[in-house]
Image (cartoon, rainbow, N blue to C red):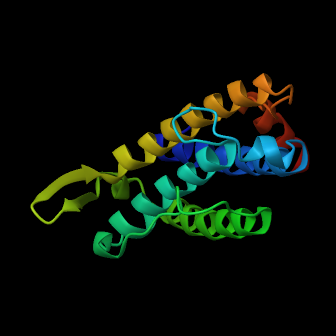
Amino acid sequence: MKSELESIQEWYEYNSFVRKKYQRAIFSEVPETERYKDRGASYPSIVDIFVHVLDGYRWWFLYVYNDRTSDATTMSGRKKYSQLEVIEEEQKIDALVMGIVKAITPEGLDLVLTVHEAPDQTWSIKLREILLHMIEEELQHRGEMNALLWQINVEPPITELQDYLRQRQHVH
C-alpha cells in the first residue's frame, strides 16, 4: 500500500501530466475567439481559468512556502496571455512545484507555514493541507474547463488517474 506522501506525489505527477494535455487542447483545438471569450465562469475565459490554476501554485509554492508573500504577483486578469507565455509559465511553475513535491519527506508533510495574507492578517497551515488543497483546486477548475469546452463542442482531454497510471506502467 502506498504511503500518504507517495499518494500525494502520484496525484501531483498525474495533474502535471494532464495539465499539459489541457494546455495543448486549449491552444490547438479551441479557436482564439472562443479561447479568450468571457464565459461568466470563476474566471472570465478558459485561458484565464488555466492561468488561475498556475497562480494558485505560484502563491502556495513560491510565495507561501518560501515566506515571500510580500513579493507575490499574479498573472490572472492582467492581460490576454499568448500560447507561448502560458507554456513558459506552466513549465516554470511545474518545475518549481514538482521539485518541492519530490523532495518532501513524510515528516515534511507536517511542516507549518505562515500565510501573510495582509499586514495584520496571518495564519498557519501545514504543508499537507496546501498539497491536498492544490489537488482539489486543480481538479475543480479542470471540471469547470470541461464544461466550457463541451459548450463549444471541443472534447476535453479527460484522463482518469487509473488510465494515467496504466500508461505510466507501460512506459517504465
**Does residue 106 appear in this view?**
yes
- Which quarter of the picture shows residue 60? bottom left
**x and y percent of residue 106 in the render?**
40, 53
Horizontally, is 94 left or right of 117 in the view?
right
User: Which quadrant of the rendered structure holds the N terminus?
Assistant: top right
In this rendering, the answer to whether 10 lies above or below 95 is: above
Residue at the image position 35 percent from the left and 76 percent from the top: 71
Q: Quadrant of residue 35?
A: top right
- Which corner quadrant of the image does residue 133 belong to? top left
Farthest-out residue, left: 120
Picture layout, residue 140 above or below residue 120: above
Q: Can I make out residue 22 in this image?
A: no
Image vertical order of residue 81 relative to residue 141, above or below: below
How many numbered markers are drawn? 0
Measuring 64% from the left and 43% from the top, which residue is drawn there?
45
Which residue is rendered at x = 50% and y = 39% of the image?
137
Point out residue 74 in the picture as x, y percentages from the top left corner.
47, 64
Identify which residue, 47 or 24, lies in the foreground: 47
**Residue positioned 33% across, 64% down in the render:** 64
Left/right of residue 48 with respect to residue 66 in the rendered view: right
Q: Nearer the viewer, residue 62 or 41?
A: 41
Residue 56: x, y in percent?
A: 47, 53
Q: Which one is in front, 106 or 84? A: 84
Q: Position of residue 150 (x, y in %)?
A: 78, 24
